[in-house]
Image: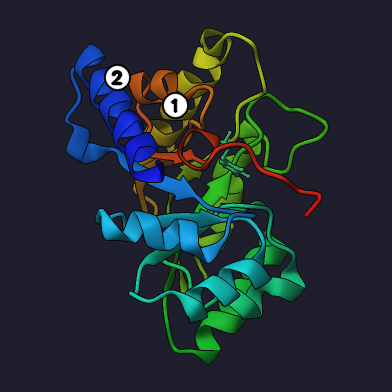
Amino acid sequence: MLAENYRIVEEQVKEACKQSGRDPKDVTIIAVSKTKPLSDIEELIKIGVTEFGENYPQELKTKYEQVSTPVHFHQIGHLQTNKVKYIIDKTVLIHSVDSYRLAEIIEKEASKHNIKIPVLIEVNYAKEATKFGVFPEDTEALIRKIARLQHIEVQGLMTSAPLVENPEENREYFSGMRDLLLDIKSKNIDNVHMKTLSMGMTNDFQVAIEEGATMVRVGTAIFGARNYAK
Ligand SMILES: *Cc1c(COP(=O)(O)O)cnc(C)c1O
């Protein structure tokens, strides 16, 4: 069942790439497994899936420790500074850095492990009151500050677009994100490599791809609806 869902998402990714003249190899699907059991992850590992997204640091840590085959876990959800230590050496990419304070804590923890950790800057492009993320106009300044930290490498931007009926409504945000990424990339800031654009979820990943997403974070379409009450 999950394997089939994943294949369908893969096909939709390919279709969106075709629509926009992009190479499907340039788009990575992150299977967002938050709240879902380890057995679901194992089911996808069997068909070769290696990229999983988690929101809650303790859950990422537990799954990392229990999974049968090493896979890549992405920290995609808001990260509290006191939780950084749980995931610092267990995640391939932190998608949700939105303050210098958080970056400083990541720097401190990464230096303890003597690793350099790739991060994305979370942008609240639509300036929603309920969302985390830095505003687009403040993004470059934050990146310039974080770029001075030795154990962090900024690799791009992430956003979660508004929940809308029609994904076309989010197209302007996605294209704005692409322009922001390209603009900052053109500044050639030391220790910054603007190559990753993490945007698009179950409801809008095709539009996000058409506008330049290189990572899409898809949960519901692969794993089914989440039950937070459990
Ligand atoms: C839960 C979550 C997703 C996946 O959302 P779906 O709509 O289930 O695809 C993607 N990104 C973030 C940051 C999330 O928290």
Who's the residue at 38% across and 57% down the image?
43
- In this rendering, the answer to whether 141 lies above or below 94 is above
Give the mark nearest the N terminus, 2 or 1: 2
| Amino acid type, mark 2 | Ala
Place of residue 58 in the rendered image (x, y in percent of width and height, measured from the top left) = 67, 72
| Amino acid type, mark 1 | Phe
Q: CA distance from mark 2 to mark 1?
A: 9 Å
Place of residue 28 in the rendered image (x, y in percent of width and height, measured from the top left) = 31, 43
Query: Dot 1: few (<14), some (14–19), or many (≥20) neighbours within 10 Å?
Result: many
Residue marked by disc 1: 205
Residue toward you, 148 or 11: 11
Is 70 on the left or on the right of 77, as rendered? left
Who's the residue at 36% across and 25% down the image?
209
Tell me if label 2 and label 1 are in contact, CB under 8 Å: yes
Q: Which of the 4 image quadrants contains residue 78?
A: bottom right
Q: Is mark 1 within 8 Å of ligand 1?
A: yes
Who's the residue at 29% across and 36% down the image?
7
- In this rendering, the answer to whether 147 lies above or below 127 is below
Instruction: Let me know if residue 46 appears in the view.
Output: yes
Residue marked by disc 2: 16
Provide the secondary structure element on which disc 2 rests: helix
Q: Which of the 4 image quadrants contains residue 112?
A: bottom right
Where the N terminus falls, by quadrant?
top left
Place of residue 118 in the rendered image (x, y in percent of width and height, measured from the top left) = 43, 64
Q: Which of the 4 image quadrants contains residue 6?
A: top left
Name the quarter showing ligand 1.
Answer: top right
